[in-house]
Image (cartoon, grey):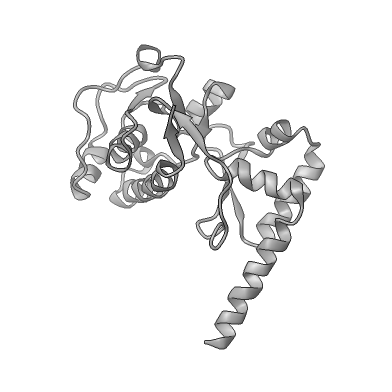
Amino acid sequence: MKVEQNQDLEMRAARHSALGDPSRLQIVDLLTLGDLSPTEIAVAMGMNSNLVSHHLNVLETVGMVARSRSEADKRRSYVHLTASALADLIPGRTERAQRVVFVCTANSARSQLAAALWATRSSIPATSAGTHPAEHIASGAVATAERHSLPLAEGKPQPLESVLTESDFVITVCDSAHEELGVSGDLHWSIPDPVRTGSDDAFDTAYDELERRISDLATRLATT
């Protein structure tokens, strides 16, 4: 037990040491609500790519960040905080919104589940839309919602242009939608498309990740 406690203390100390650099602390603050590519981090911080790479390597070494390959542009990667990155640490970023709009390409799975989950965690209104909406909600998403006793919104997937207003807080949950919209979104969550695989495990993994992120964001997103 004492060995495990010492190991935990050493890991916590390593994370605090990594965050002792102002630039790395700023990177973590940027990532507390959404995923960013290294290029997006460089632009946000006004820093050259080599220095960003160095800071990301330090954060990755202490287990605070991980990277995933974009499903859309295979040359691009996204950086996200690991599930334990902020254990015993206090996130530093908060936001305000009148309404949340979850966006993916087809508006048939991830964005539908996200909007339904949000309604169980926050009183701020939420809806979903797609950049290229499908004809219907994916059967896998419907089945996932049923397994988790989560009521999905009725109706067909909606095009983003018919839903979006200037005051909306936009969260893309799809790499393709994020890269299509660019800087017009407020947050991006790089969540693999469960429809590609179609398995229950793929849908449940997406559901669990959405639930984790929404539970965190709901406590830090206030009404305007």
* Res 108 → quadrant: top left
Image quadrant for the C terminus?
top left
Q: Nearer the viewer, residue 81 or 174?
A: 81
- Give the image location of residue 179, x and y in percent: 55, 26
> Is residue 153 toward the left or the right of residue 172 in the image?
left
Q: Residue furthest bottom?
A: 2
Point 32% across, 52% down: residue = 201
Q: Is residue 83 visible?
A: yes
Point 19% across, 38% down: residue = 151
> Is residue 59 toward the left or the right of residue 162 in the image?
right
* Res 46 → quadrant: top right
Point 51% across, 33% down: residue = 187
Q: Report the label total.
A: 0
Q: Is residue 96 above or below residue 52?
A: above
- Give the image location of residue 219, x and y in percent: 42, 44
Q: Nearer the viewer, residue 181 or 136?
A: 181
Point 72% across, 49% down: residue = 24
- Give the image location of residue 7, x and y in percent: 61, 78
Q: Is residue 78 visible?
A: no
Q: Nearer the viewer, residue 134 or 5?
A: 5
Q: Residue furthest front?
A: 224
Q: Nearer the viewer, residue 8 or 205?
A: 8
- Give the image location of residue 74, x and y in percent: 59, 37
Q: Residue furthest top?
A: 162
